[in-house]
Amino acid sequence: MRLGRVFVYVFWCFALLLGGVFGAQYAIEKGIVDLSNIENFVKRTVDKTSNYSDSSNAYLENPRTFTTKLSEHYMLTLVGETRLKAGTFGASRLAWTPGTMAVSPDETQLFVAGHAQKSTIGAFSIGDFALEKKVSDLPIAPNSQPFHPTREGIELRDRENKIGRITGLEVINGKLWMNMAQYYDGSGNQRSTTIIIDNPDHIGGSRSGFHEIEGAVRAAGWMGELPQVFKAFTPHTHYTGYASNLPINSRLSMGPSFYAFTPRYDKKEGGRIFFPTEEVLSYSLKNPLGVYGVSDNTDIHKLWNELSVANIGFFTNSATHYILIGTNRAMESEISYKKRKSDGSKCSGYCSEVKADKVNYFWLYSTKDLITSMRGDIAPYELTPIEFGRLELYRDSHSIRGADFNPTTHTLYILLSGADDTQNRNESQPLLQKYQLTER
């Protein structure tokens, strides 16, 4: 009997391993995932989207005249850039940040996660931006608040000491909200998601948590206020979302998500708070946006794949679209698992066979479609972007690491990974860009 149980256990472990490597192909072949609707959509979209190929030398252009398309509906104009002071401040440093960030409502402070392995948060003063071709000529934003441990002063329960990756930051009602996740959660049991810092000007001060956003890591990433157009269809005031940006697909949305919620918070009440949500946009292994696991260079693969990352979702004042920006890989190559790349190095997990095959990207959803889902007329996984493709930025050889949008000033802030090697030759820093978004 014991040998029989051991055999069953080994069999299922082997099956799960195969599922991780060949999940997409198996699901499609067995009919678990119906891609027919997505295939038809992508065929229509690819004809209209010309942003897949690396056709730009944007990083060589004049910064004073740089503009770029964000879909067929929006334009981005570069306002300026700033370096961020290198060095150790408090408990961490900015180099190797996961990129999660938020800009204060008055646009004077950048709140940002520290080194990815340190689970810290710090701040920089960002009042001075410039338009210069050479990175060395750009101003340097000083550190205004040293990095502090995210869980400082929090009474931790169960496995909460493993929840360290910051997935979302936002100033809401005068508090700094911080969504977090366990980087590798094989069990997928994380429910604690949120810490609230009472005073954004004193990020090392009092805080509360962990609180719980319904939907867990599938929901708890970037945050924002719902535009007025949604008020007739939901009692909620804000939204939160995330994507398959971390390991263990089963706990994540296999594409960008959107959940409505209300960030009610009164410290006087004490204790931990559960925040109910309304699922509007979300995908699963059974119903992914594109494909996952090992995949070849197909149109659906370019819509969303195992290596796609969405850093932020936001609305403009017109609230016509839900705009997401991030990165996409393997646009011209295949995605493999623990194989050798074209340069001879070996993948530690999933990777594009050509290391440099990575581009900045956008996805655009119709607000009308979100409302249709909110009304219950279609399922959250039935929504597809109305447009997607490459987002060409200034210094485009560097990838988006983080982003934030101010809907009042229509300002988009983007953190470019490793774009500043002027302060420390051995450890490059991210560079902060400031864009003005206009509707076409």
Image: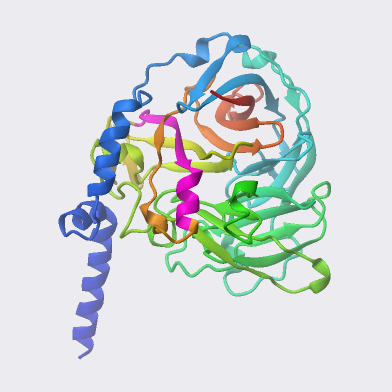
- Position of 83 compared to 207: left or right? left
Q: Which stretch did the figure color magenta?
A: 355-373
Q: Position of residue 105 (x, y in %)?
A: 76, 40
Q: Give the vertical position of 353 relative to 30 (above or below).
A: above
Q: Is residue 255 above or below residue 188?
A: above
Taking 179 as reference, is 352 left or right? left
Residue drawn at the location 79% of the way across and 42% of the way down = 145
- Is 265 located above or below residue 94 in the figure? below
Quadrant assignment for the N terminus? bottom left
Residue 169 located left or right of residue 197: left
At x 23% / y 39%, what residue is drawn? 296
Q: Residue at x 75, y 36 (%)?
A: 124
Residue 362 sits inside the magenta stretch: yes
Q: Is residue 29 visible?
A: yes
Q: Quadrant of residue 63?
A: top right
Furthest toward the left, the residue is 29
Q: Residue furthest bottom?
A: 1
- Camera-side residue: 84 or 324? 324
User: 264 and 267: which one is in front?
Assistant: 264
Residue in the foreground of this view, choosing between 396 and 257 = 257
Percent position of residue 433, x then y = 63, 26
* 88 with respect to 12 (left or right): right
Q: Residue at x 51, y 20 (%)?
A: 68
Rendered location of residue 333, percent (x, y): 27, 32
Query: Which colouring convention does the figure follow?
Result: rainbow
**Residue 315 position within the rendered picture, expressed as x and y whole percent measured from the top left:** 59, 40
**Front-most of residues 103 and 138:** 103
Q: Per the image, is 304 magenta? A: no
Q: In the displayed image of the protein, which residue is found farthest to the front?
A: 232
Q: Quadrant of residue 354?
A: top left
Q: Is residue 327 above or below residue 150?
A: above
Task: Confirm whether residue 331 shows in the render.
Answer: no
